[in-house]
Amino acid sequence: MQGPEDSQTQKQEGHQLQSNDDNEFLQNVIVMRHGDRLDCSEFLWITTTRRPWDTPLAESGRVRSFCTGRKIRQWTDFPIHRVFVSPFLRCIQTASEVVCALCAVHDNQIEMTSENVPIDPSKIKVAIEYGLCEVLSGDAISPDLAPEDGNFEFNLAKLEEMLPAGTVDHSAERVYQEMPKWEESLIEARDRYKQVIYALADKYPHENLLIVTHGEGVGIAISAFMKDTLVYAVEYCGYAHTRRKISFDDNQKFTASNFEVFTKSIESGISYCPISAMPPDV
């Protein structure tokens, strides 16, 4: 088994391989689900808040998020340049832990959260993206908990303060300038996730991206790029790794190959199978 030092060496070599030819780049996009929700372990939490639809992370979620970020840093052969995150609190808190792990000055195997971890904020830029939000329908949010007027409001300035200092890219233009409408269909939400993944990747073709979103978004990062595939489980902090080849002409206009999925079933917390392997309806 390789150790962290070997992995870091491979990462540097992988980055060099991507950079040797100015006309080509292997773009990696990782799409991750948020960490463990507080409302799934403290059931009375929803009675104590004005925003029962916007649960924070449980402490176990902070730990899982930080450790997953450290895992990505140690075992991938490419650097992450940008992080995009859903405005929901659990995703913001997940991104904060993951970014700290990715930007840590030292490879510390002892710390379990970002609390005592010094970081280099110049390594990664972070931005909030409305289009990565939860499915806005009863499929994901109980109508009893949703805002009565269907207006999911977020204080972006306050949310950005929760992200590691110096990492927020205030110049990044969002794909969705406002939140999707309440009671979107599941099909519409899945199309939204696919559209946003492509839009962000196309916007930053020279960079590797990490996207922190919700379970349906992670599932789409598999099923949209693998034919005849059904994703049937996405664990907390489960993530899909996709990659495509970008080719640039002399004017830096680019063409891109199709995304390939490099995450195997059950690996990285995602389970999927061919649709054709599913038993027929009884």
Image (tube, helix red, strand yellow):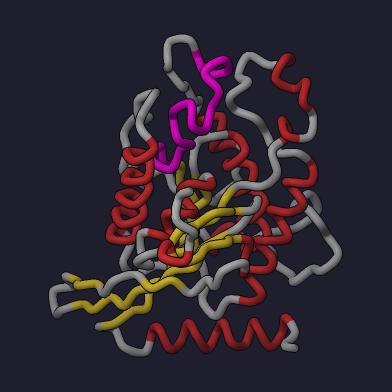
Question: Is residue 273 among what the camera can see?
Answer: yes
> Against 194, is 270 above or below?
below
The one nearer the camera, 228 or 90, is 228
Question: Is residue 125 among what the camera can see?
Answer: no
The magenta-colored residue range is 129-147
Residue at the (66%, 75%) spot, across then down = 74
Residue at the (21%, 77%) spot, across then down = 248
Does 270 sit left or right of 39 as displayed?
left
Residue 62 on image: x %, y %: 73, 47
Residue 230 on image: x %, y %: 45, 58
Does 179 sit left or right of 236 as displayed?
left
Residue 259 on image: x %, y %: 34, 70
Does 115 sit left or right of 169 as displayed?
right
Residue at the (23%, 79%) spot, across then down = 247
Q: Quadrant of residue 162?
A: top right
Residue at the (29%, 82%) spot, across then down = 24
Q: Outermost residue toward the top?
A: 148
The one nearer the camera, 49 or 209, is 49
